[in-house]
Image: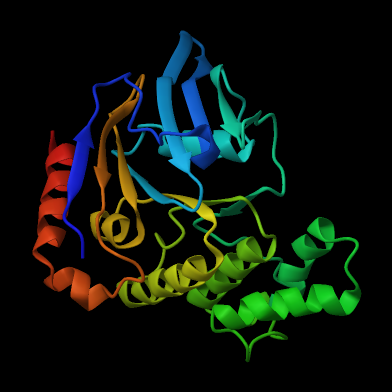
Amino acid sequence: MTTSIHTTVEPGATAVQPTSLRDVMLNIKDLTKIYPTPTGGYTVLENLNLQIKKEEFVSIIGHSGCGKTTLLTMIAGLNNISGGQILLNELPITGPGPDRGVIFQSPSLLPWMTALENVLIGVKQVFPQATKNQQLDICKYYLSKVGLESAFHKKATELSQGMQQRVGIARAFALKPKVLLLDEPFGMLDSLTRSELQDVLLEVWNREKITAIQITHDVDEAIFLADRVIMMTSGPKAQIGDILKIGFERPRNRKALLDHPDYYHYRKHLIDFLEH
């Protein structure tokens, strides 16, 4: 495993950037978000700059209210930009699209539909030219990859919370997005299920190599999953406060990481940031 590297950035400064735009999937420039209030505008994010490379897995951490979810929903195109811009493959994001898949804390499945039918809804929209059998094959492939090969025809109401989230993961990957956005997808799960689904997510991600951005409050989860951990300053006017590069090789083994001395250096760095 490689040694740890971290880079501190001054608030408002451009974070560590790839050397060539050809390597960049997401380019966030001077991003600002202002929400109207009865007493005037409330600035959640101000002049936030960040570049995320193709096939990179990034975790974003910070205190509640710092604008993590606001940032994610702006990348998803679900939240209007007040200032600056977000470029995806050098094209500005102006709204939602199939090039960005989102996994929320709750998978929001249609309860009267089966696991297969829930995944099929999106696949039909994204791959309308495919035959019915081809569409079904895509759904079955990704449901199998998340361990649900025996649950294709179970209705969402028959699935545990962890199994429902597996469907959500399969659904997102099945759409073949350029960017995967994860908003605390394991936050409502017990610790054992959470660990299992982290492993599932990494296994599928290692195969697909989709650029991924995850919001989490869990320091250990951030280290285990990410290539870089982005630390946001507290709001209002939140920015990038620090970036920690995670030097562990992939594929990752949880026990090997916990036994590695660098793991606790990473963990201390993140906790120190959050406590200041």
- The residue at 20%/59% (across/down) is 2
Q: Quadrant of residue 231?
A: top left
Residue furthest top as drawn: 40
- State whether residue 45 is above or below residue 88: above
Q: Quadrant of residue 253?
A: bottom left
Residue 236 left/right relative to 71: left
Residue 128 left/right relative to 66: right
- Looking at the picture, tell me which residue is in the foreground, 246 or 241: 246
Does residue 157 appear anywhere in the picture? no
- The residue at 41%/38% (across/down) is 68
- Looking at the picture, tell me which residue is in the foreground, 148 or 7: 7
- Looking at the picture, tell me which residue is in the foreground, 140 or 29: 29
Where does the image place residue 168, in percent across and percent down from the top left?
Answer: 59, 66
Q: Quadrant of the N terminus?
A: bottom left
Q: Quadrant of the C terminus?
A: top left
Where does the image place residue 165, in percent across and percent down from the top left?
Answer: 53, 69
- The residue at 76%/79% (across/down) is 137
Residue 188 left/right relative to 276: right
- The residue at 65%/54% (across/down) is 177
